[in-house]
Image (spheres, helix red, strand yellow):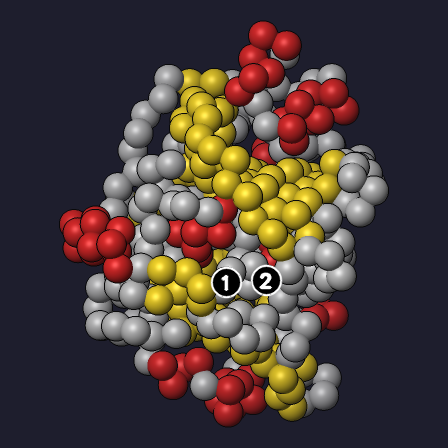
Amino acid sequence: MAKYAEHLTEGQKAMFAKYPDYRMIVYPSLRTAYFPTEVEQATIKNATTASLKGTDEVEGAVLGFPFPIPKSGAEVLWNHKMRFRGSAVRRYNNQAIVKLDGSYKISKLVEDVKFKYANLQEANPGTKILLYYLSEVLSPPRVAGQLILVHETSGAEGSGRDAWIYNPGLGRVNRAPDVGYDNPYIGTDGEQFNDQVDLFNGALDRYDWKLVGKKDMYIPYNSFLINAPLIKYKDIIRPGHINQNLARYEMHRVWIVEATLRQGLRHQFKKRRFYVDEDSWAIAAVDCYDNRDQLWKVQEGQLITVPFVPTVTAIPEIIYDLQSGRYFVTALQNEDKISDFKIDFNDRDFAPNGLARKAQSK
């Protein structure tokens, strides 16, 4: 490992140290990321018009990546958050908490997203709403039927989102102020915080952001084998870590960003280091440190290009817990339907007053 250490993340080094059978198969680099021409042209314009107030208020950006020439770590993260991912998508999400012995149970969700920013189907200039998100838990039975609705926003106030939850046991819709930051995502037994979905999401306001620079690193890329329909979940999930024979790594230039918890604010991660693909602005890996400055969790997103959108996305995503030895896998789709990027949603599909009605109609 020492020969290649310069190009490994701290998380990857920790995985090699903890698991003697851990390996990374590195392939020749292929720069396959691309986006619609309209997005690329808008990105050029944004370079001179977009600005960031504080950590969470983006102004002057339209359609494209807001900060193609980032001057701060926060701007890099906003490129990730505002990247083009199509106009809408329905994702059939299968996830698993993997125990020390490799045993697991699959939990299932259906996630609907309408992107308000970077939407080629409808113009939303100046919108503060980035996206609408609605998830329905299908299993396990103890949380089945639960609905979570999120309106993700750009703005200086609040947590960066408004959220509501429908609990079938109570039969009513409530505001959900805890859907954010380090509150555990439902059904993950604490192995995924809300702001770890999509490697990172939500408000940036609890951290100071440092742009470390750019560097060539080994990151997951063109990870089509691990997503092949012939590959089953039992082929992917192994004790300690996923089957690394199915993972694919390439050398790519990444932006490295460090987030350090602000004095007086609370989060279970005191520091995070992000590795963001230069071509797609998608986060490929994150090192997460606890409040004792110990590396605690290692995030990895298996990046693939989706040519019919086109975009780059991470499927699956893995979160390794170095302290407990467990890990969490999300966005598994091998044994399910593929994501539907052709689906069309109305804004009213994401109205809070429709949550209970949606649940009762099933």
Q: Which mark is residue 54?
A: 1
Q: Amino acid at mark 1?
A: Gly
Distance, label 1 to label 2, CA atoms, is 8 Å
Q: Decide if residue 307 is on the left or right side of residue 276.
A: left
Q: Is residue 156 above or below residue 108?
A: below
Q: Residue at x 64, y 79 (%)?
A: 176
Total marks shown come to 2
Q: Residue at x 47, y 72 (%)?
A: 155
Towards the viewer: 11 or 242: 11
Q: Is residue 161 above or below residue 53?
A: below
Q: Residue at x 44, y 23 (%)?
A: 216
The answer to which of marks 1 and 2 sits earlier in the sequence is 1
Q: Which mark is residue 110?
A: none
Tell me whether the residue at label 1 lies in contact with that at label 2, contact meaning CB atoms closer than 8 angstroms: yes
Secondary structure of the residue carrying numbered label 2? loop
How packed is label 1: few (under 14 Cα within 10 Å), some, or many (20 or more)? few
Q: Quadrant of the N terminus?
A: top right
Residue 334 at x, y = what percent? 48, 44
Secondary structure of the residue carrying numbered label 1? loop
Residue 342 at x, y = what percent? 28, 62
Q: Residue at x 41, y 26 (%)?
A: 252
Q: Nearer the viewer, mark 1 or mark 2?
A: 1
Residue 107 at x, y = what percent? 64, 57
Q: Amino acid at mark 2?
A: Asp
Q: Is residue 297 above or below residue 141?
A: above
The residue wearing badge 2 is 205
